[in-house]
Image (cartoon, rainbow, N blue to C red):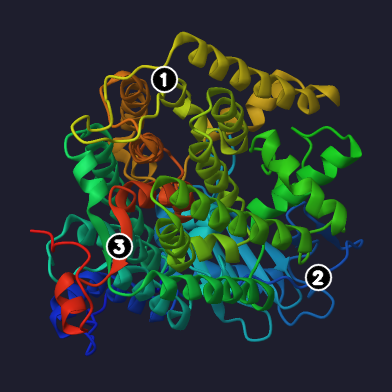
């Protein structure tokens, strides 16, 4: 743990609105948790300092540059050139740290080494040599000029630098409360119905917003709090999506009841345009490219040059080849237009790709909403994406997770065509593999629009020729995607080891299954249950329209995420569009306000107020 960690707690700040007096109670309930979470972003993110990118000293006769970029001085007692301290002095300072002493008592016989780090720092690493592999158990970072300790880490924070709470490590300025809080409130407020404060949709919005609490704790390096908080939120969403997808009765009635909004749809349309501009501008002026985006650029460069894709990534992104080949192919146009320099620099190709994926989701959500209910729902779904802070978190980290979201929304859009949905689902599955679990559900899908009395025709089954068309298209795309993998010296074994093999054996503190030793092995049970769920929802009587398909697809993916030994907030983008389609698409075309508000304004009521 970090020696001095910021506390993960703060008081809630209720949100009031004077424009709509009767909405005060509902708005407080809907935004109180959000503001609580986002105020936590004001807490300093641990004792760690931002990662340094200063150029490492060159290798000389008295120093050895390691593959990690650290430099090992040749002498304990001679000061390296341009340094104020010796290795021996640095080791003595680190040895005296109480947190290090406590860790070394648990590992008798541990050893340590001092390294030059950057142009003005030292790193002392402590190792446990008792196992088959040397394991680093503690790490201390010191300032060369003063000898003061800047950082000290033990436990999982030694190996996982992303668990240290470095400010802005993911998304830079998006973590600012001045960005996050307005977005979080803007996401919730339009969907609050003040006449029905206990509406299930309000709870759903709170759950989606409550992930901000876990993120705030993650930013404060409180992983032992952040990781467990995610589990009940994911579990709730699984249950909620199953409830919507498997509940047929009343589907037609819900489709006739309009979606109540606090503001007119045209206001949301203007907000979509504004927020898109804001996202693009923020990406340009204050964003970073994490290893995920870097991986896409490297893979695209390899594909374009005909080089081996799997098992040949550079040292500074050794496991960047863990994604499917479609991920790297999607980056090829951007890498060719903005070529990779060969190092981890600003990576303009990654910026271009991330922004394009983000805008593609917006466009596809509008088209899907228009297809389900009309242009109003299309605008509302697009607004939900651009207003949800975690989608901006993905965009500003220049990650590839929006590509998965775009593929899933696109698959829903063409779901009426078995070969089209088969081909597109295979492409999505070859980005990050998880969507492959949706193959049974989409193969046996027979879409029917809900009509009075049939609840979406839950007993409808697709003809055999439709299932065959889906399977042929699905397998054909898988076969074509394998060509670039095998064409340039790749093997199925290398592909497996780099992708699913690596991910299967991956352990991290970002899952309760590896964070808590008492739960070791139970992830297999959850993973098995998720696979069983993926098969069951394909054959159970269910709501057979786009809304039901989105709900069950989201349930399967969320269940799979519950069993992962590595989960991160970027993964919310995969299922968020599906969840919003399920929550909002059940109703008729959106309209602003209630019948009573319209009467106050002197306008005629177009529909009776709901009970």
Using residue 62 as the reference point, say whether residue 406 is left or right of it.
left
Q: In which quarter of the image is residue 261?
A: bottom left
Place of residue 595 in the rendered image (x, y in percent of width and height, measured from the top left):
17, 71
Residue position marked by numbered label 3 in the rendering: 210
Using residue 9 as the reference point, say whether residue 431 is left or right of it.
right
Residue position marked by numbered label 2 in the rendering: 55
Q: How many C-alpha atoms fall within 10 Å of the one at disc 2: few (<14), some, or many (≥20)? A: few
Quadrant occupied by the C terminus: bottom left
Place of residue 37 in the rendered image (x, y in percent of width and height, measured from the top left):
32, 71
CA distance for labels 2 and 1: 56 Å
163 in relation to 304, above or below:
below
Secondary structure under the numbered disc 1 in the rendered image = loop
Asked if residue 50 shows in the view, the reply is: yes
| Mark whose residue sits in front, 1 or 3 | 1
Observer-nearest of 42 and 91 = 42
Disc nearer the start of the sequence (1/3): 3
Residues at marks 2 and 3 touching, judged by CB atoms closer than 8 Å: no
Using residue 89 as the reference point, say whether residue 413 is left or right of it.
left
Q: How many C-alpha atoms fall within 10 Å of the one at disc 3: few (<14), some, or many (≥20)? A: many
Place of residue 598 in the rendered image (x, y in percent of width and height, measured from the top left):
21, 77
Secondary structure under the numbered disc 2 in the rendered image = loop
The residue located at (53%, 37%) in the rendering is 411
Residue position marked by numbered label 1 in the rendering: 444
Place of residue 12 in the rendered image (x, y in percent of width and height, measured from the top left):
22, 79
């Amino acid at each position: 743990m970090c020696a001095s960690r910021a506390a993960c707690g703060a008081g809630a700040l209720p949100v009031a609105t004077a424009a709509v007096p009767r909405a005060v109670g509902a708005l407080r309930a809907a935004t109180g948790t959000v503001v609580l979470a986002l105020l936590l972003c004001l807490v300093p993110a641990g004792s760690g300092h931002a990662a340094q990118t200063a150029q490492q000293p060159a290798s000389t006769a008295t120093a050895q540059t390691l593959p990690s970029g650290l430099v090992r001085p040749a002498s304990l007692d001679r000061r390296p050139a341009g340094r104020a301290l010796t290795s021996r002095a640095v080791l003595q300072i680190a040895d005296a740290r109480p947190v290090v002493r406590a860790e070394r008592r648990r590992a008798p016989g541990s050893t340590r080494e001092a390294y030059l780090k950057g142009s003005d720092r030292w790193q002392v690493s402590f190792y446990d040599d008792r196992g088959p592999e040397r394991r680093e158990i503690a790490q201390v970072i010191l300032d060369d000029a003063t000898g003061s300790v800047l950082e000290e880490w033990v436990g999982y924070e030694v190996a996982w630098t992303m668990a240290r709470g470095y400010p802005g490590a993911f998304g830079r300025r998006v973590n600012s409360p001045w960005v996050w809080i307005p977005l979080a409130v803007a996401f919730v407020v339009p969907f609050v119905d003040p006449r029905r404060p206990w509406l299930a949709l309000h709870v759903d919005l709170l759950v989606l917003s409550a992930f901000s609490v876990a993120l705030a704790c993650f930013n404060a390096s409180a992983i032992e709090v952040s990781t467990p908080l995610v589990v009940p939120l994911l579990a709730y969403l699984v249950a909620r999506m199953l409830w919507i997808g498997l509940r047929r009765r009343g589907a037609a009635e819900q489709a006739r009841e309009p979606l109540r909004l606090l503001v007119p749809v045209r206001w949301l349309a203007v907000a979509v345009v504004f927020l898109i501009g804001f996202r693009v501008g923020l990406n340009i002026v204050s964003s970073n490219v994490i290893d995920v985006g870097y991986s896409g650029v490297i893979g695209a460069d390899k594909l374009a040059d005909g080089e081996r894709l799997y098992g040949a990534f550079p040292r500074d992104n050794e496991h960047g080849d863990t994604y499917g080949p479609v991920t790297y192919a999607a980056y090829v146009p951007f890498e060719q237009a903005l070529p990779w320099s060969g190092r981890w620099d600003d990576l303009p190709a990654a910026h271009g790709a991330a922004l394009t994926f983000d805008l593609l989701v917006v466009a596809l959500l509008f088209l899907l909403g228009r297809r389900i209910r009309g242009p109003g729902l299309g605008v509302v779904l697009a607004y939900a994406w651009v207003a949800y802070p975690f989608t901006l978190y993905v965009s500003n980290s220049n990650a590839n997770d929006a590509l998965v979201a775009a593929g899933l929304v696109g698959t829903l859009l063409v779901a009426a065509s078995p070969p089209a949905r088969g081909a597109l689902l295979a492409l999505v599955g070859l980005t990050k593999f998880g969507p492959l679990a949706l193959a049974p559900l989409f193969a046996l899908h027979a879409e029917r629009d809900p009509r009075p009395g049939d609840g979406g025709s839950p007993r409808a089954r697709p003809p055999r020729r439709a299932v065959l068309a889906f399977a042929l298209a699905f397998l054909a795309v898988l076969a074509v995607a394998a060509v670039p993998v095998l064409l340039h010296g790749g093997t199925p074994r290398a592909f497996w080891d780099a992708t699913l093999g690596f991910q299967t054996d991956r352990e991290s503190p970002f899952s309760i299954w590896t964070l808590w030793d008492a739960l070791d092995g139970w992830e297999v049970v959850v993973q098995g249950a998720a696979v069983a769920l993926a098969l069951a929802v394909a054959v159970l009587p269910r709501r057979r329209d786009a809304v039901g398909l989105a709900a069950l697809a989201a349930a399967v993916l969320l269940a799979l995420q519950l069993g992962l030994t590595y989960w991160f907030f970027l993964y919310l983008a995969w299922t968020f569009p599906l969840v919003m389609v399920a929550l909002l698409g059940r109703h008729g075309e959106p309209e602003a306000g209630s019948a009573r508000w319209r009467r106050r304004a002197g306008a005629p009521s177009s529909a009776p107020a709901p009970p």
